[in-house]
Image (tube, rainbow, N blue to C red):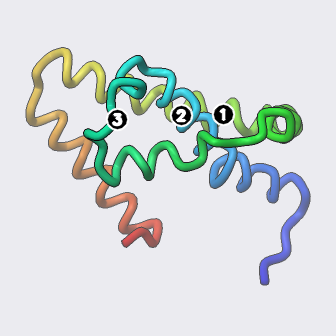
Amino acid sequence: LTFSQPEEHDRIIAFTSQLAHIVSSAYVKSPEAQRRRGFSAGSFQDMTRVARLDEDMWTELFLDDADYLIRELDILIHHLTDYSEALKARDAERVRALLKEGRELKAAAGGN
């Protein structure tokens, strides 16, 4: 059981729940999502699981935590830009370093 102030709770939920819903919703908007039938593996299922949501409820929740959610989106966009720039430059060492950093940070955060 963890106790927190409402602001702390909202900040945590913006990152641990709401950001995942936005990422998943944006991800399935790729034209490839409609062409993937029969060709997807577990990663697609993992990335899209939370895209099936109640937009009325989640809109209200997102707006309630908008400041925290915007901060997390900006951080995510920054990191995605790092990957995009490394790929555009065909910089294998940078891509490898970005992937290694992500794996190590996941492990440090308690990921398996």
Residue 14, relative to residue 36: is it above or below? Answer: below
The structure residue drawn at horizontal position 33% and vertical position 32%, both measured from the top left corner, is 36
Residue 110 screen position, x and y as percent: 45, 72
- The local secondary structure at tag 2 comes to helix
100 displayed left or right of 20: left
Locate the C terminus by quadrant.
bottom left
63 displayed left or right of 99: right
3 displayed left or right of 40: right
- Earlier along the polypeptide chain: callout 3 or callout 1? 3
- The local secondary structure at tag 1 comes to helix
How much space separates mark 3 and mark 1, taking CA atoms? 34 Å
The structure residue drawn at horizontal position 41% and vertical position 25%, both measured from the top left corner, is 34
- Earlier along the polypeptide chain: callout 2 or callout 3? 3
The structure residue drawn at horizontal position 70% and vertical position 42%, both measured from the top left corner, is 53
Kind of residue sitting beneath label 1: Arg
Q: Quadrant of residue 38?
A: top left
Check residue 50 in the rendering and tell me which mark sits there, or answer none: none
Check residue 71 in the rendering and tell me which mark sits there, or answer none: 1
**Which one is nearer the viewer's eye here, 106 or 30?**
30
Q: Nearer the viewer, mark 3 or mark 1?
A: 3
How much space separates mark 1 and mark 2, taking CA atoms? 6 Å
Check residue 37 in the rendering and tell me which mark sits there, or answer none: 3
Kind of residue sitting beneath label 2: Ile
Which residue is labeled 2 in the image? 75
How much space separates mark 2 and mark 3, taking CA atoms? 31 Å
The structure residue drawn at horizontal position 66% and vertical position 33%, both measured from the top left corner, is 71
Residue 111 screen position, x and y as percent: 42, 68
- Residues at discs 1 and 2 in contact (Cβ within 8 Å): yes
